[in-house]
Amino acid sequence: DAGITQSPRHKVTETGTPVTLRCHQTENHRYMYWYRQDPGHGLRLIHYSYGVKDTDKGEVSDGYSVSRSKTEDFLLTLESATSSQTSVYFCAIMLLDTGELFFGEGSRLTVL
Amino acid sequence: QKEVEQNSGPLSVPEGAIASLNCTYSDRGSQSFFWYRQYSGKSPELIMSIYSNGDKEDGRFTAQLNKASQYVSLLIRDSQPSDSATYLCAGRYGNNRLAFGKGNQVVVIP
């Protein structure tokens, strides 16, 4: 157990509304990641963080922003949700010495 | 964009048989590779890590890495119904990121 919790686990929202997903870790890992997973596309990196206030874009970052004001929390924000952002979102942490990623339980987001 | 490809379709194997999964990667600089298992509706779970050429065995799982040919494989021996899942291959590249393949579904038939 890598001590990662995601909230909310399930959310249904309407197009155009803002949504924030939270990832919380308890083990002081420096690197944290947000992925989305869709049928036919696999896991795709949205944004990642390498420290407090240090973030960078992944391959599918359009329409998403992130913030990391504390080591333990990494927030993913959809400023104005669209139906194409309906997906399962996974947060992960990396053990830097091995490169191993460990995932949270996922947040299923439906945008109507 | 770094790519990891898993091209095989769903794999059905009889219980007790060997399941063989393959993936290829594009970045010759990648040094670390991983296999994840994902049950339906669950998050990916790390089952194997491999860093050097050759084979690495862990229980019924064997990972194989061939850097010259840029492929990674996973063998599941004595397949069990509990092995029915989607298996994801991943490779590590610059800036501490992992690129994932799209996954291969394995169905073990009792």
Image (tube, rainbow, N blue to C red):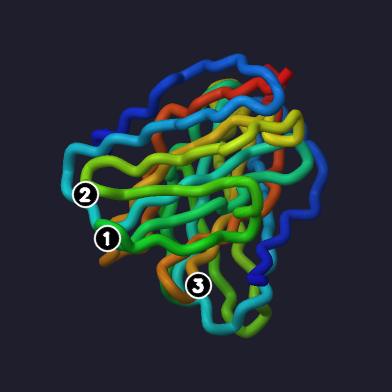
3 or 2: mark nearer the eye: 2
The chain ID associated with circle 1 is A
Disc 1 marks a residue whose amino acid type is Gly
Instruction: Using a 10 Å C-alpha cutoff, classify the residue at mark 3 as few (fewer than 14 neighbours), some (14 to 19) or many (20 or more).
Output: some
Disc 2 marks a residue whose amino acid type is Thr
Can residue B59 be seen at all in this image of the molecule?
no
Query: Which residue corresponds to mark 3?
Result: B93
Which residue is rendered at x = 56% and y = 26% of the image?
Answer: B39
Instruction: Determine whether the residue tagged by mark 2 lies in a helix, strand or loop.
Output: loop
* A27 and B79: which is toward the camera: A27
Image-quadrant location for residue B25: bottom right
Relative to residue B76, is residue A70 drawn left or right?
A: left
Image mark for residue A51: 1
Please give the count of numbered marks on the rendered protein: 3
Residue B108: image location, x then y, percent: 67, 26
Query: Which residue corresponds to mark 2?
Result: A71
| Distance of label 3 from label 2 (alpha carbons) | 23 Å
